[in-house]
Amino acid sequence: MKLSELQKKDIIDVNSGIKVGNIIDVIINDSGFITSLIVDRNNFSFNFLMTRAEAEISFDSIVKIGEDVVLVKIKDN
């Protein structure tokens, strides 16, 4: 699978069923393996501002990569 194909998929948290965001980048270790996904999180609010933030999701958190979505299990802090 290509990174461009992954970037088209929505990231969904299996705990809440909420869309986390979309992949904008990946972190690759020295051995060439993907260790984390960088996700662009869009937090919409009813005020005049839209906050955009990036979140790093460990590759180990991926439950399933489907045809349209990537299911991740985000641990509670």
Image (spheres, helix red, strand yellow):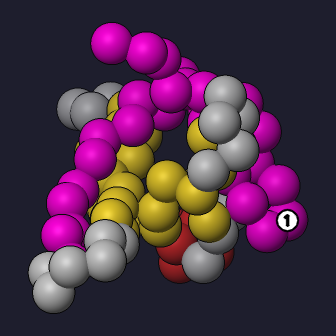
Where residue 32 sits, quadrant-wise, is top left
Q: Is 49 on the left or on the right of 61, as rendered?
A: left
Amino acid on which the number 1 mark rests in the picture = Glu
Where residue 1 sits, quadrant-wise, is bottom right
Question: In front: 14, or 70?
Answer: 14
Q: Position of residue 33 (x, y in %)?
A: 42, 36
Q: Is 40 on the left or on the right of 54, as rendered?
A: right
Q: Position of residue 31 (x, y in %)?
A: 32, 30
Relative to 50, residue 58 above or below:
above
Identify the residue under disc 1: 67
In the image, what residue occupies the spot 79% across and 68% down?
68
Relative to 18, residue 62 above or below:
above
Q: Local crowd at mark 1 within 10 Å, few (<14), some, or many (≥20)? A: few
Q: Position of residue 74 (x, y in %)?
A: 50, 27
Region of the chain picked out in magenta, as a range: 50-77
In the image, what residue occupies the spot 33% across and 65% down?
43
